Image: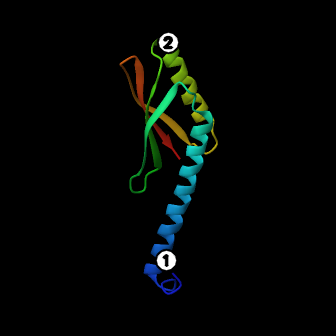
Amino acid sequence: MRLLKGNAYGEQIENALNYDKFYADKGIEVIKTLSRITPVSISINEIDFNQEESGPFIMRLNGYVNTVGSSGRLILNNYLKRLSGERIIEEVVLVNQRVANNTIIFNIDIIL
């Protein structure tokens, strides 16, 4: 890294590494938060990280609530409120929800 530091390519590489480290650290912090606040009645199957050029960094959660009906909706709504109350999270968006096989399947975007 020292050899490249004095030129434009070296600065671009260093900026990219700093950017990656910043969002990797944020991602780890959010995952720790998820493990702390996610109730046992919610299962997360998949976590995707995405950022489009000049857009926000988005973490998508795909999962399900093990209860349907008003109880399941209440669990999901309370979870969304808890996520929204975390300082590291800028915005929480429920992208999709549907009922299948006695579970509520959901997709949530967490904007960092």
- Cα distance between the residues tagged 2 and 1: 54 Å
Local SS, label 2? helix
Kindly indicate whether the residue at mark 1 contacts the one at mark 2 (C-beta within 8 angstroms): no
Q: How is the image coloured?
A: rainbow
**Label 2 Cα crowd, 10 Å radius (few <14 / some 14-19 / many 20+):** few
Q: Is residue 43 left or right of residue 38?
A: left
- The dot on residue 70 is 2
Which of the two residues, 67 or 18, is positioned nearer the viewer here?
67
| Element marked by disc 1 | helix
Depicted 11 relative to depicted 100: above or below: below
What residue lies at 43% left-to-right and 32% top-to-bottom?
63
Disc sitting over residue 38 in the figure: none
Residue 21 position by quadrant: bottom right
Could you say where residue 57 lies in the image, as x and y percent from the top left? 47, 50
Q: Going by the picture, which residue comes out furthest to the left?
A: 100
Find residue 20 and report its horizontal and vertical position in percent: 49, 62
Residue 15's spot in the image, x, y percent? 50, 70
What residue is disc 1 on? 11
Report crowding for label 1: few under 14, some 14 to 19, many 20 or more residues within 10 A (C-alpha).
some
Q: Report x, y in % for residue 43.
A: 48, 31
Compared to residue 101, the image places residue 25 above or below, namely: below
**Which residue appears at 53% of the width and 66% of the height?**
18
What amino acid type is highlighted by mark number 2? Ser
In the image, what residue type sits under mark 1?
Glu
Residue plotted at (50% across, 87% down): 3
The residue drawn where x is 51% and y is 86% is 6
Q: Earlier in the sequence, mark 2 or mark 1?
A: 1
